[in-house]
Image (tube, rainbow, N blue to C red):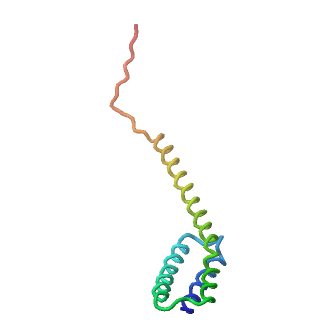
Amino acid sequence: MDNLILELERLNHSVIENLQEIPYEKLVEFTELRQDVVEKMMARACMSPLNTEQKHRISEIVATDSLIRNRMETLKEEASKWLQQRGLAKTRRNAYEVTYNLDSVLMDQRK
């Protein structure tokens, strides 16, 4: 169990180190790796309970979750704004690219 906790600490440390510059791809990779480690830990915890030191180490890891979650929320907001801007640009571009009926006839009526 200690080696799994150590791996989890290593993963967390690598992400926290560069949290403000880390791209979303690395965060996705981090969450997948972390989930694998947590699943292994849960399987082993059923067989033998955690001691006090292990619980303390895990609680320190969990304490950093809010920092990581905030970064994920920031990236999500940036992506949302980008998508909104793309949508507006597409709408504006489509307004100028309206196809007109070239077969129409202009009639000039004189009185």
Left or right: residue 34 compared with residue 59: left
- Find residue 13 and report its horizontal and vertical position in percent: 63, 81
Q: Residue furthest top?
A: 111
Residue 72 drawn above or below residue 111: below
The quadrant in which residue 60 appears is: bottom right
Q: Which residue is at a point 46% across and 43% down the rendered structure image?
A: 94
Front-lying residue, 93 or 21 = 21
Q: Which residue is at a point 60% across and 80% down the rendered structure image?
A: 12
Front-lying residue, 38 or 80 = 38
- Find residue 32 and report its horizontal and vertical position in percent: 49, 77
Looking at the rendered image, the quarter that the C terminus falls into is top left
Left or right: residue 68 compared with residue 42: right
Q: How many marks on residues?
A: 0
Residue 7 drawn above or below residue 69: below
Q: Residue furthest left?
A: 103
The quadrant in which residue 10 appears is: bottom right
- Find residue 106 and report its horizontal and vertical position in percent: 38, 23
- Find residue 6 and report its horizontal and vertical position in percent: 59, 89
Q: Which residue is at a point 50% across and 86% down the rendered structure image?
A: 41
Q: Which residue is at a point 52% across and 47% down the rendered structure image?
A: 88
Front-lying residue, 84 or 71 = 71
